[in-house]
Amino acid sequence: MDQSRSRPSAPLALRRALETVLVYAVLASVAVLTVFPFVWVFFTSFKGPNDPIVSVPPQLLPHDPTLANYARVWSQLPVGRFYANSLLVTGAVVVFNTLLSALAAYPLAKMKFPGRDAIFYLLLATYIVPPVLTSIPSFVLAVTVFRYYDQLASVILPYLAGVLNIFLLRQAFKAVPDDLIDAGRIDGAGEFRIWWTILMPIVRPSLATVAIITFVEQWNNFFWPSLMLHTRETMTLQVGLVALQGAFANDARGIAAGVVMTVVPMIIFFAALQRQFIRGLTGAVKG
Amino acid sequence: MTRRLSLTPYLFLAPALLVIAVFVLYPIGAVVYYSFTDYNIVTPPVWIGFKNYQQLARDPIFWKALRNSFLYLLVTPILISLSMLLAIVVNRRLPGITAFRALFFIPVVSGSIAVGIAWRLMLDTNGIINGLLLALGLLQEPIQWLAEPALTLPLAMALTTWLGLGYYMMIFLAGLQNIPEELYDSAVIDGCNTWQKHWHVSVPGLRPQITFVAVISSLAALQVFNEIFTLTGGLGGILNSGVTIVFYLWRQAFRLNHAGLASAIAMVLLAITLVFSILNIRLLERGTEEA
């Protein structure tokens, strides 16, 4: 340790260059580990019947590229419906959850009323409860009360409000100066109009954060949808992908095509909105 | 005016509270009740006292599930150290660095089901992993990755780590960017080499993030399901080698229709989660005090 001080250090530029090479080596190897499963699945999904899935030495690129695997999957499973269902469920949950959570967050942040702290701490306490715990009674409700088993409503309704989203938006509303709200009240605006026309535009970045968190969560949601959706026509992409895995048990190319179709929309979306995604998903930490 | 104001906050809260009351609060109460009943969802629950809990205490698979879930907590220190190291590596200005950061984040958004199924394909006895290892001469015989009980849990944990690395890296990166540059400068003046510099400056500076990641990743580890489900094809692994608390709950409730017994498992999970959360909040308070 002390040697580094006494030893004549290598020229600074050389050491810097060495460090840079080392850093790139680490980055490249982690990148390979990260990307390899996607790349392999992607190429496998285009492999023809004469391209081996595995061989020694392994063959990554298809020699005989084909869309037949995709065609086979599309013809045996209603993949279009999976997409439509996933879009509908995710879209509905993102829009309504964001709105209902923002509605609830406003009085918690900016109004004084009896029971406010009790409500807030009650919500906080429910956040600790593992979601799986509620699945058994929710299943009973779905079958006996709501009677929406195997219908898309069953995977929308339970997610129409979220405790985390309420917290994040409460923080955002708290940061808005009271003067703005008072000015609105003096102008005679009702609380709802103040919320919609004054507050909501100001907290737009936080709304985006909440929308992105909800979007990723819902698009990839599996546990509850897998309990509710059993008919192929009602399945979302994630549930459909597991059904596909079962139906194509010995068809690695077909399963690979299914994985690609499930993952690609999200990766495209992420590539387009990288910054918002990363800020949104990790920004929740500070909230 | 005062009367309108007194009702308004409740009107704003009502829709969200209704959803949470029906889908979170009521179920918590119901699951406590179910845990004391013999219940198969189809016929009404019958009160049986503590019998479900007694049955669990005698159930070797339940103990195995508990053990597996606690073993699974090993992902937390692994994730903390790997993602902190990676954050230190990407915390510099180099051409292409933002592209690398984004690349490392892709598993976070791509969903554990699709990725788990991709891993299952790769780990097949006739899969690419064996192919690569055989071609490199690292293996003489293919390994039955998915049929070897000792490997089920480690593979699922590797998958969890792989899925979460980019997310936690970003959290540490944000923390690193808040550490004042002067602290590093003075560490260098004090004669620290690169490793010592990070050990004495970065690690203490990241204390709040370490605590946060510990909390989040350990609670997620206790609740792991998707990784086990996809890697074992929904079966839980040979000899229940991959059965965790949540997986066992799922199997008892939704495969075997033992909703009462599963509710008792849920109560055990809740108790563990509460103890963990209290410990974690203590840690969190200490972490932020010292930060």
Image (cartoon, coloured by chain):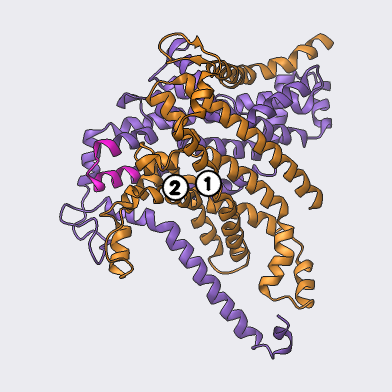
Identify the amino acid type marked 1: Leu
Most prominent secondary structure in the magenta stretch? helix
Chain colored orange: B
| Residue that label 1 marks | B71
Q: Which residue is farthest bottom?
A: A8
Secondary element type, mark 2: helix
For residue B178: magenta?
Answer: no
Left or right position of B76 against B195? left
Task: Residue at 37% x, 33% y: name it.
Answer: A239
In the depicted view, which residue is nearer to us: A273 or A235?
Answer: A235
| Neighbours of disc 1 within 10 Å: few (<14), some (14-19), many (20+) | some
Contact flag, marks 1 and 2 (Cβ < 8 Å): yes
Q: Are the residues flagged by discs 1 and 2 from a single subunit?
A: yes
Along the line of sight, the residue nearer the viewer: B89 or A3: A3
Asked if residue B1 can be seen in this view, the reply is no
Label ID, residue B153: 2
Q: Considering only order in the chain, which callout, 2 or 1, is on the residue closer to the N terminus? A: 1
Magenta residue span: A245-259
CA distance separating discs 1 and 2: 8 Å
Q: Residue at x 55, y 50 (%)?
A: B74
Q: Mark 1 lies on which chain?
A: B
